[in-house]
Image (spheres, grey):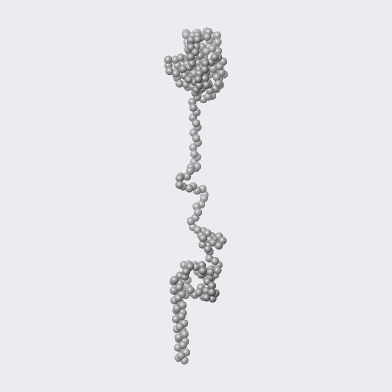
Amino acid sequence: QAPPASAAACSTRDGVSVVIDFGGSIRTGCAAGDPASAWQAVTSAGFTLEGTQRFPATFVCRVDGYPTPANEPCVQTPPATAYWALWSAPAGGSWSYSTTGAASLNPAPGTVVALAFGAGRQPAMAPPAPAPTTPAPSPSTSKGSQSPAPGTTSRPVGSTAPSSTPSTTRTGRATSSGRTPTSPDAASSGATSPGASADPSLAGSTSSATDRSTGTVAAADAGRGPTQPALVISGGAATGLLLILGALLVRRQRDRARDQ
C-alpha cells in the first residue's frame, strides 16, 4: 500500500476540503464556498462520481472510474466488503462516519469530507487543517521621526541661539550687561571716562576746586576709581611751577621797590 499523501486541501476556512482514499493512494482537493452536499463538494473539488443504476445520484459507486466496471457493475449497492464509506470532520479534527448518503450530508465551510474505499475503514490521513495565517509586517518608522543620538539635544527648526554678546539696550536704570549707566549729575560735572585723554595742566584742579568750594564730593568722583598716578604727578608739577613763578615775581617786585 502506498503511503498517505499530504493534503493539498483548502488553505482557508472559506471552503470544504475533500479527501479521496483509493486504498493504495490518496488525493485531496478543495470545494470553494459552501456546497449544498458532500456529493457536490466532491465534484466541485474536481472528482467524478458515479452512482448505481438503482440510486444514480445518491449512492456513490465509482470515483474517477474506480472500481472498474469489470470489478463492480454498479447495478445494485456494492457489497459491504468493497464500497465507498463517507466521512466528515472539522478541519484538523477527527473523522466521524456519516450515517447519511453523500447527497444528504451538508458540510459547512471549514470542514472536511472524505470517501474511503474498502470495508468501512476511515481514511489513512488525518483531516487537513488550513495553513496558519502569516501576520502582516508592522509598518516601518517614518522618515524625519528619528530620535536624536544619545547625548545630543535637539533644537526646533527656526530657533535662534542666544547671542554671546551682551546687549547694550537700557532697561530702567541698568543696562542688560549689568552695569549702571552714567547718571546725568556725573555727565554735567565734567567727569571723563577711564582711558580718555585729559589736559595735564587742568588735571587735579577742577575737581579739587569744586570740592573745596562746596565741601562735598562730586557724584562723578564718587563713582570713579582711584586717581591715576600720572595725573597726580602732573598736577603737582604744575602747582609747583606756579609757586616758583609766583615767588620769582614777588622777589622781582621787591627788588624794584628797594632800588627806587
Q: Position of residue 232 (x, y in %)?
A: 45, 73
For image coordinates 49% across by 16% down, the residue present is 122
Q: Position of residue 87 (x, y in %)?
A: 51, 16
For image coordinates 54% across by 74% down, the residue present is 215
Res. 212 visible in picture: yes
Q: Residue furthest bottom?
A: 260
Q: Position of residue 196 (x, y in %)?
A: 47, 68
Whether 206 is drawn above or below 167: the answer is: below
For image coordinates 48% across by 14% down, the residue present is 121
Whether 141 is drawn above or below 175: the answer is: above
Q: Nearer the viewer, residue 225 or 154?
A: 225
Whether 80 is drawn above or below 257: the answer is: above
| Location of the N terminus (image quadrant) | top left
State which quadrant residue 53 falls in.
top right
Res. 210 visible in picture: no
Whether 49 is drawn above or below 159: the answer is: above
Q: Nearer the viewer, residue 140 or 240?
A: 240
For image coordinates 45% across by 45% down, the residue present is 150
